[in-house]
Image (tube, rainbow, N blue to C red):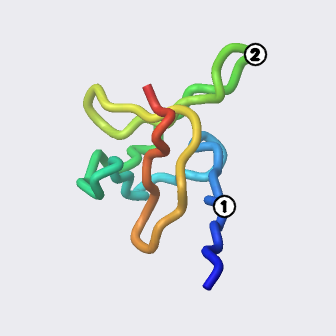
Amino acid sequence: MPRIAWARNLYNAYHHIKKGDKVYDENNNLFGIADGGYARCTQHSPGTVFLGGKKFVSGDVEKIENGWKLHSNQS
């Protein structure tokens, strides 16, 4: 039987994560909850979503059943 590879649907965190959304790391552990703080996109940055405290996420995320999952290219 042939194997079928499905592409991931990746989204820009700045445009899709809303206040109160949960964000999980690659191991499905809760990384943080969006607190409503954002830093705008620039020519050098895809924008930033703040998760409370000193945590933030920038770049691509993947939609999962109960929130958002960080994509492996996060730094």
Q: Classify 10 Å Cα crowding around label 2: few (below 14), some (14-19), many (20 and above).
A: few
Residue 57: x %, y % from top left: 45, 35
User: On the rendered structure, is 18 left or right of 50?
Assistant: right
Query: What residue lies at 68% left-to-right and 14% top-to-bottom?
Result: 44
Type of amino acid at the residue the image marks with label 1: Ala
28 relative to 50, above or below: below
Residue mark closest to the camera, 1 vs 2: 1
Residue 51: x %, y % from top left: 36, 40
Quadrant of the drawing holding the C terminus? top left
User: On the rendered structure, is 72 left or right of 6?
Assistant: left
* The quarter of the displayed image where residue 1 is located: bottom right
Q: Which residue is mark 1?
A: 7
Instruction: Point out the tag, 1 or 2, that comes first from the N-terminus.
Output: 1
Residue 39: x %, y % from top left: 57, 26
Q: Which residue is mark 2?
A: 43
Secondary structure state at the residue bearing disc 1: loop
User: On the rendered structure, is 35 left or right of 61?
Assistant: left
Query: What residue lies at 63% left-to-right and 52% top-to-bottom?
Result: 10
Secondary structure state at the residue bearing disc 2: loop
